[in-house]
Image (cartoon, rainbow, N blue to C red):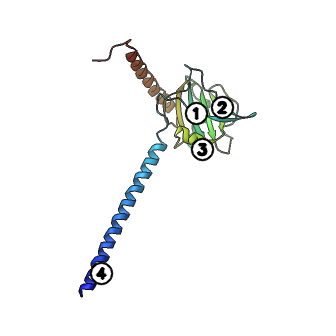
Amino acid sequence: MSGLELAAFGTLWFVLALLATLVFILYRQVEKAYGASTELQNVGLQPGVEAPDVEVVTQDGTRLLRFPAPGEFAFLAFLTTSCEACVKLVRELRSGEPLPGPVIGLITGEDRGEFSGADDGGFHPLWVAHPADIIRDYGIGTTPYIYVVRGRTVLGSRSVETQAGLRELLREADQFEATRSDRDRQAQGTISAPP
């Protein structure tokens, strides 16, 4: 092999190694971006923040969702009509034991069969006017996704598929409220900090 051929051969291997390194770096960046995107989609609003406005469709057009009064408690259930777990949850809510607050069903999709019907006192079905805004504002990555709110304040959220799951989420929300109340009283000086 001549010196020129040897140099060309070495350069070729160098270029191949460089390309392999670039492909590896690109793969890692795509993997990071996908992981971050998935993580953001499933985070939702953090407890303690104010829930954003939701525009819902009514017989008279669209209007903003009327949140519970300050101090009143409710579940915001984000549901899609194509989701089997959502259909199962709605059936369970309508036939199961009453919850300690109303469930406001914020529904997207075309088929309104399982989700339509009169407000039965415990489950209030409402159709979302702008689903893309809700997905962005509330961080909905999967359905059914439930928020526990007192007034407009978020107390907890996660994906829940059963009434038992709603009750567990309620216990977590109660723990958040108790912890927040203790922090508020400590900040005001009405209770002492633990040793």
Q: CA distance from mark 1 to mark 4?
A: 72 Å
Question: Quick one: SS at disc 2?
Answer: strand
Quadrant showing the N terminus? bottom left
- Residue 90 falls in image quadrant: top right
- The disc placed on residue 172 is none
Q: Residue at x 42, y 24 (%)?
A: 175
Mark earlier in primary sequence (1, 4): 4
Q: Which residue is mark 4?
A: 8
Q: Earlier in the sequence, mark 2 or mark 1?
A: 2
Q: Say what amino acid the circle numbered 2 marks.
A: Leu
> Which residue is label 2 attached to?
64
Look at the picture and state if 36 lies above or below 17.
Answer: above
Distance from disc 4 to disc 2, alpha carbons, whole Å, reads 70 Å
- The tag earlier along the polypeptide, 4 or 2, is 4
- Secondary structure of residue under mark 4: helix
* Image depth: mark 1 or mark 4 in front: 4
For residue 177, what is the image quadrant?
A: top left
Q: Determine if residue 144 is in view.
A: no
Please give the label number shown on residue 132: 3
Q: Label 3's element?
A: helix
**Marks 3, 4: nearer the viewer:** 4
C-alpha span from label 3 to label 1: 27 Å
Q: Check whether the beta carbons of the residues at disc 3 and disc 4 lie within 8 A of each other.
A: no
Please tell me in which quadrant of the rendered image residue 11 appears.
bottom left
Amino acid carrying label 1: it is Glu
Where does the image place residue 137, in percent across and percent down from the top left? 55, 38
Label 4 packing within 10 angstroms: few (<14), some (14-19), many (20+)? few
Q: Counting other residues with Cα less than 10 Å from the Cα at mark 2, is it few (<14), some (14-19), or many (20 or more)?
A: few
The residue positioned 57% from the left and 37% from the top of the image is 78
Residue annotated with mark 1 = 92
